[in-house]
Image (spheres, rainbow, N blue to C red):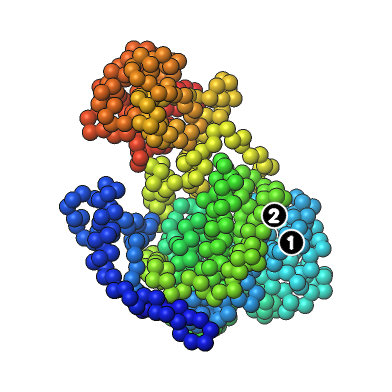
């Protein structure tokens, strides 16, 4: 297609008319030149397309290519099946999305203050954690003091206490004189998430009764949540989260139909919850794929087209949040919120940046809600219907992710459905496999965590927050991507508190600054990820210069360029060991290991293993 500029009164100049359309082969030739200059390929052409050198793979095995030139996917229209482009024809252009903030403070008075502050400052619905891990059900009325339930949507999240929480909430609405038709929200029955979180089967009969009651009395309320967060929090991939949520929704459909509900009514009782991460394109694709898959299930079940549109609540990922350098979490949650809105979620929760540390303070809650306000009111993100639609990359990624999730969903169904797959350990086993791959990628820093595994701040004082209530345990684990590195940082800080000195490695810098600085900076950064400080020799011309700066650290690391390594590394390593060094590292990976060097640190090394070993040799944790 030729691009045209336009002006008032008619078509403008054809800007590309004087240029030949480049071919893919010409583009590949230019890519090959850049890759050769970068040392990523040699003179011999790689097997297959040259751009595959730049491709990466997701945890579902989906190849992400550097260039997409077309797709056979037909996305359809917004608000129409298969709902790839959103569940509403107008998208968020009329009212944006529902800004839904989470509240889990166990003190009713503090919860009430936080709730009112949120409602006065842009939040449009409340997500209330009740029972274990949150506010006592009996304190719900106090927490909602001053909240007009006919003006605000409420989502309950009470685990196994959902029957009591629903009864308490509905009675409170009755006491306020709220018409049953005016209530909006979700009552939070989710027995399968309870089973996933605790290992104990939830109350199927109570969930079905609540859904039938909502159908009969409260047309604006949904009873059931098909929650993908337990599977995401356990380390699962995007397709695994999608497949489990889809299996949960399908199970709830069966339960309601078996209890006598028609399939359209049953589908109307469900809301789905998904994680939104800082990988914006995967988040966008996940939400789009979820709608497509649910439409496929409900169409097969005979649901009329309007009822096949999935209601989605997106929550910024807890596993991606860090306790160290938590300020970076503001950036992560901004990207995730952007992706959730772009992906078409009807409701979005932005978790406060300090949520991994404890109970968020008022500043963190304000930043969380203002993140959404900025995207809605200043960036006008919701005013474009399906802004990602038509992107060859997004449409292709959505299609491949949907196929991977559908395969996992079919495997769960073949195992007897989600309750049976949870009971047998099938789900736990698969999620654990994915988590181990993710954990290894973080350990090798191929999955970088800014402020933790990359560019950590050793002088950062840990942020203090009141501890959050203990959550239910016994089922799937909860992981955070940064947990291994943060455990190393904690151990190093404990060593500092106990001894008055931070564990330190000596950097034997060889040659002038211009030669050693890159590897010296790399090593210093890697050590700081484990809470280990570094001191260096500075510019040196000889082994004697290095020894003059050395102050007896048990672990040292040589830092320089390959040419100087060939000349001085072996001699310097031997001299340092005679001077008291017990373990000598070398930054880089030369073809011929110098004599006296015990191990190497380099891009792609197992940083977690290196730091664990350094801790042991420096007496950290002993």
Q: Give the percent coordinates (x, y) of residue 390.
A: 43, 75
The total of numbered circles placed on residues is: 2
Question: Could you tell me which residue is drawn at 24 percent across and 61 percent down?
Answer: 29
Question: Could you tell me which residue is drawn at 61 percent across and 50 percent down?
Answer: 353
Q: Give the percent coordinates (x, y) of residue 456.
A: 51, 38
Q: Is residue 563 left or right of residue 497?
A: left
Secondary-structure class at tag 2: helix
Which image quadrant for residue 407?
bottom left
Write down the residue under mark 2.
Answer: 366
Pick the residue in front: 200 or 16: 16
Residue 425 drawn above or below residue 395: above
Question: Could you tell me which residue is drawn at 40 percent across and 29 percent down?
Answer: 513
Can you see residue 398? Answer: no
Which image quadrant for residue 547?
top left
Name the disc covering residue 319, or none. none
Secondary-structure class at tag 1: loop
Quarter of the N terminus within the rendering: bottom left
Can you see residue 181? Answer: yes
Which image quadrant for residue 91?
bottom right
Pick the residue in front: 297 or 125: 125
Residue lying at the far left of the rendered structure: 44
How packed mark 1 is, by other alpha carbons closer than 10 Å (few <14, some 14-19, many 20 or more), is: few
Name the disc covering residue 121, or none. 1
Tell whether label 1 touches label 2 (CB within 8 Å): yes
Q: Give the percent coordinates (x, y) of residue 287.
A: 49, 68
Question: Could you tell me which residue is drawn at 31 percent across and 31 percent down?
Answer: 561
3D distance between C-alphas at marks 2 and 1? 8 Å
How packed mark 2 is, by other alpha carbons closer than 10 Å (few <14, some 14-19, many 20 or more), is: some
Mark earlier in primary sequence (2, 1): 1
Q: Is residue 622 left or right of residue 330?
A: left
Q: Is residue 565 left or right of residue 607?
A: left
């Amino acid at each position: 297609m030729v691009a045209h500029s336009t002006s008032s009164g008619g078509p403008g100049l054809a800007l590309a008319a004087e240029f030949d359309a480049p071919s893919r082969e010409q583009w590949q030739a230019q890519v090959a030149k850049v890759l050769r200059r970068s040392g990523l390929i040699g003179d011999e052409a790689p097997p297959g397309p040259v751009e595959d050198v730049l491709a990466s793979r997701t945890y579902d095995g989906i190849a992400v290519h550097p260039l997409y030139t077309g797709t056979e996917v037909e996305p359809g229209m917004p608000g129409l099946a298969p709902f790839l482009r959103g569940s509403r024809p107008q998208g968020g252009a009329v009212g944006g999305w529902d800004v839904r903030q989470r509240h889990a403070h166990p003190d009713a008075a503090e919860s009430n203050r936080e709730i009112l502050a949120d409602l006065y400052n842009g939040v449009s619905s409340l997500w209330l954690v009740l029972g274990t891990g949150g506010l006592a059900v009996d304190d719900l009325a106090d927490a909602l003091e001053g909240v007009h339930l006919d003006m605000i949507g409420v989502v309950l999240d009470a685990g196994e206490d959902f029957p009591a929480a629903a009864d308490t909430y509905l009675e409170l609405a009755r006491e306020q004189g709220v018409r049953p038709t005016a209530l909006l929200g979700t009552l939070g029955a989710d027995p399968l998430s309870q089973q996933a979180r605790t290992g104990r089967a939830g109350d199927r009969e109570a969930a079905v009764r609540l859904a039938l009651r909502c159908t009969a009395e409260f047309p604006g309320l949904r009873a059931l949540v098909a929650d993908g967060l337990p599977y995401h929090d356990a380390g699962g991939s995007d397709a695994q989260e999608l497949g489990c949520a889809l299996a949960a929704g399908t199970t709830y459909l069966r339960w309601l139909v078996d209890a006598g509900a028609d399939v359209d009514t049953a589908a109307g009782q469900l809301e789905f919850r998904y994680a939104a991460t800082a990988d914006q394109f995967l988040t966008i694709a996940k939400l789009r794929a979820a709608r497509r898959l649910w439409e496929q299930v409900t169409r097969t079940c005979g649901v009329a087209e309007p009822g096949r549109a999935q209601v989605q609540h997106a929550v910024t990922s807890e596993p991606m949040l860090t306790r160290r350098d938590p300020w970076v979490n503001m950036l992560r949650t901004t990207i995730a919120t952007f992706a959730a809105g772009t992906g078409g979620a009807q409701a979005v929760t932005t978790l406060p940046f300090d949520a991994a540390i404890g109970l968020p303070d008022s500043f963190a809650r304000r930043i969380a809600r203002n993140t959404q306000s900025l995207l809605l009111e200043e960036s006008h993100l919701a005013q474009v219907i399906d802004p990602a639609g038509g992107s060859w990359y997004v449409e292709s990624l959505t299609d491949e992710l949907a196929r991977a999730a559908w395969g996992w969903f079919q495997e769960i169904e073949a195992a007897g459905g989600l309750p049976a797959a949870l009971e047998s350990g099938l789900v736990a086993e698969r999620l654990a496999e994915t988590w181990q791959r993710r954990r290894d990628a973080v350990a090798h820093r191929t999955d970088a965590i800014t402020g933790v595994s990359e560019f950590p701040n050793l002088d950062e004082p840990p942020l203090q927050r009141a501890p959050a209530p203990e959550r239910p345990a016994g089922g799937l684990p909860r992981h955070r991507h940064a947990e291994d590195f943060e455990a190393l940082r904690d151990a190093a800080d404990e060593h500092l508190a106990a001894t008055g000195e931070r564990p330190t490695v000596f950097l034997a810098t060889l040659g002038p600054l211009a030669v050693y600085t890159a590897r010296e900076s790399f090593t210093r950064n890697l050590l700081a990820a484990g809470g280990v400080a570094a001191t260096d020799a500075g510019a040196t011309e000889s082994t004697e210069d290095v020894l003059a700066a050395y102050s007896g650290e048990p672990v040292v690391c040589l830092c320089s360029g390959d040419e100087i390594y060939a000349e001085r590394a072996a001699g310097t390593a031997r001299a340092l060991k005679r001077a008291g060094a017990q373990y000598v590292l070398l930054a880089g990976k030369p073809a011929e290991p110098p004599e006296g060097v015990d191990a190497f640190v380099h891009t792609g090394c197992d940083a977690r293993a290196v730091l664990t070993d350094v801790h042991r040799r420096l007496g950290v944790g002993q």
